Amino acid sequence: MDTRELYQEVILDHNRSPKNFKKIENPTSMAVGHNPLCGDEITVSIIVEDDVVEDVGFQGVGCAISQASASMMTAAIKGKPVDAVRELFEKFHRMVASEEETDLDAMGKLAAFGGVREFPARVKCASLPWHTMKAALDEVSETVVTE
Ligand code: ZN
């Protein structure tokens, strides 16, 4: 399966049944993200205990790509140490937004978004949930705007 097919399949799948689409009671931190180019809005709430992401949820409205990316992101970071999550953020960001070669095999299912680089307008949709999650980890309280 090439990246493009994988991309379409994953996005359809996560829109049909998004993971962790929920409000978390008593999150240790949360952040709101907004992508004005597309109209995507997302709230990420997170529970960090002993430097591990114990739980994470997202809510919001947006295009299929932003929703699928949020769903996959939450699935990818839940249960992981914060350090590993920050590393994954960097890798994901590099994969979708830089010219550098990415080892897609090392990205697991997130490799589906490797193809988004070809569609610059969509990069912000795919990366919005990640930036919002990082803001929550950093406990930045203002709204994240991708522009
Ligand atoms: Zn979007």
Image (spheres, grey):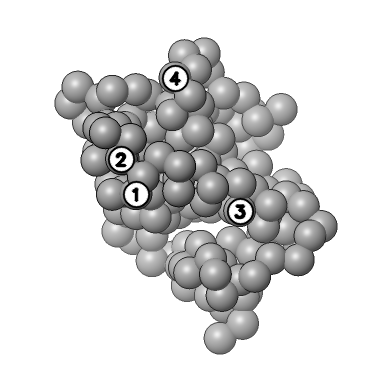
Contact (Cβ within 8 Å) of mark 2 with mark 1: yes
Q: Does the residue labelled 2 lie within 8 Å of ligand 1?
A: no
The location of residue 132, given as percent across then percent down, is: 50, 32
Contact (Cβ within 8 Å) of mark 1 with mark 4: no
Mark 4 vs 2, N-terminal side:
2
- Residue 139 is marked as 4
Distance CA(mark 1)–CA(mark 4): 18 Å
Distance CA(mark 4)–CA(mark 2): 15 Å
Q: Quadrant of residue 50?
A: top left
The residue at which mark 2 appears reads as: 52
- Residue 80 is marked as 1
Q: How crowded is mark 1: few (under 14 residues within 10 Å), some or many (20 or more)?
A: some
Distance CA(mark 2)–CA(mark 1): 6 Å
Q: In which quarter of the image is the N terminus?
A: bottom right
Contact (Cβ within 8 Å) of mark 3 with mark 1: no
The residue positioned 24% from the left and 40% from the top of the image is: 54
The residue at which mark 3 appears reads as: 91
Mark 3 vs 1, N-terminal side:
1
Three-letter residue code for mark 3: Lys
Badge 1 marks a residue whose secondary structure is loop
Three-letter residue code for mark 1: Lys
The location of residue 121, given as percent across then percent down, is: 73, 47
Distance CA(mark 2)–CA(mark 3): 19 Å
